[in-house]
Image (cartoon, grey):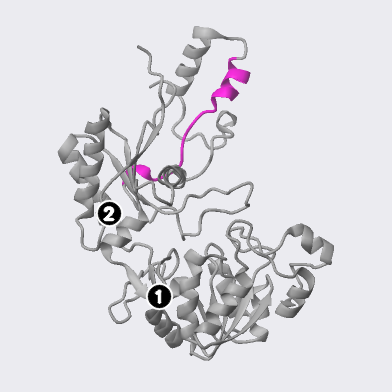
Amino acid sequence: MERKVGTISRGVRCPIIREGDDLASIVVDSVLEAAESEGFEMRDKDVVAITESIVARSQGNYASVDAIAEDVKAKLGGETIGVIFPILSRNRFAICLRGIAKGAKKIVLMLSYPSDEVGNHLISVDALDEAGVNPYSDVLSLEKYRELFGENKHEFTGVDYVEYYQNLIKEEGCDVEVIFANSAKMILNYTKNVLTCDIHTRARTKRILKENGAERVCGLDDILTTSINGNGYNSAYGLLGSNKSTEDTVKLFPRECRDLVFDIQKKLKERCGKDVEVMVYGDGAFKDPVGKIWELADPCVSPAYTDGLEGTPNELKLKYLADNDFKDLSGEELQNAIEAKIKEKDGNLKGDMASQGTTPRRLTDLIGSLCDLTSGSGDKGTPIVLVQGYFDNFTN
């Protein structure tokens, strides 16, 4: 019978992961037990993906606000610090901000507006237009911001992040001044010691600050790159990708996990005889068209993956072939012509019109986004995702 199903993405349940657990064995056991219980078989080129959260949990990669404070103080001087371009998130940044505030006497908090880097809005673009404010050039004090826009609570969380962040800083015994600007160098009118908290634009922001006279510049990726008093760390990303664990600790992005993905790949080969690809994934790289939020608050979608996941898709657009190359064909004749075209396609279709619209993104970003949507971020209990048929095409 002709195959009727293409790509399948399954969430796989596993035990709650604790520090020190043999994660590779747990992942392999969970996937194979799922296959047995649901009656499906593993195949070559399947993808087993595991969320970064359980990797970091198994590593015990946690850090306290005191560790953050100590590192911030050592690297930025402990006096007046500019904290610029943080995202508006209780989960992602609030606990980090507690630690930063503990490591300074005063913070000048500079928020981007009308939204943060990942699309959380303080105010609407329409409100800016009505107020006659130019976000590219105008620097607003807190008083001017309140005069123009009043109190603004987040559409989904109901939190006024300006007030929330201000209070967090004060609770740690640190003075605070809040301003609103989108030009990094504006912070240098207040202090020459700056912690830039943006994610994907951080390299450019650091360069601009240094070129314009900043004395000490760090990004979140420069904080906790080594262990402080036995706390967790991440040599590549520091605090980037961290999440709230408790009111005074954060879970960091997992560190050095390439060995893990290759270990899982090897164990699956030994157990089921199949050549399976493995990856660790965090946030998906997709944007919500209603809330305008870009999901990717991690520094990357996948910090580790096996070799078969390198690269981008190399696909033909079926509807382009049907509407152009084979517009006069139909039925079985059309299907046979398209199958033949797929079988003879070049190994690199870059620039070929027949490949236009085929999502020119990295495989790990595409599959990681699929996995993030499959596993969710709440109580589904499926931190492992098995993707089958992703590399198949119309001819398989």
Residue 389, above or below 161:
above
Q: Quadrant of the C terminus?
A: top left
Within 10 angstroms of label 2, few (less than 14), some, or many (20 or more) residues?
A: few
Q: Which residue is mark 1?
A: 248
Amino acid carrying label 2: it is: Ile
Q: Which mark is residue 16?
A: 2
* Image-based side of 266 in relation to 76, left or right: left
Residue 270, above or below 124:
above
Whole-percent x, y for residue 141 in the image = 72, 79
Residue stretch rendered in magenta on the structure: 307-326
- Element on which disc 1 rests: loop
Asked whether residue 147 is drawn in magenta, I would say no
Q: Is residue 344 visible?
A: no
Whether tag 1 and tag 2 are in contact, CB under 8 A, the answer is no
- Element on which disc 2 rests: loop
Nearest the viewer among 124 and 71 is 124
Count of marks placed on residues: 2
Residue 15, above or below 240:
above
Whole-percent x, y for residue 124 in the image = 72, 59
Q: Residue furthest left?
A: 270
Amino acid carrying label 1: it is: Asp
Residue at screen point 41% across, 31% down = 7
Q: Residue furthest front?
A: 158
Residue at screen point 70% across, 69% down = 151
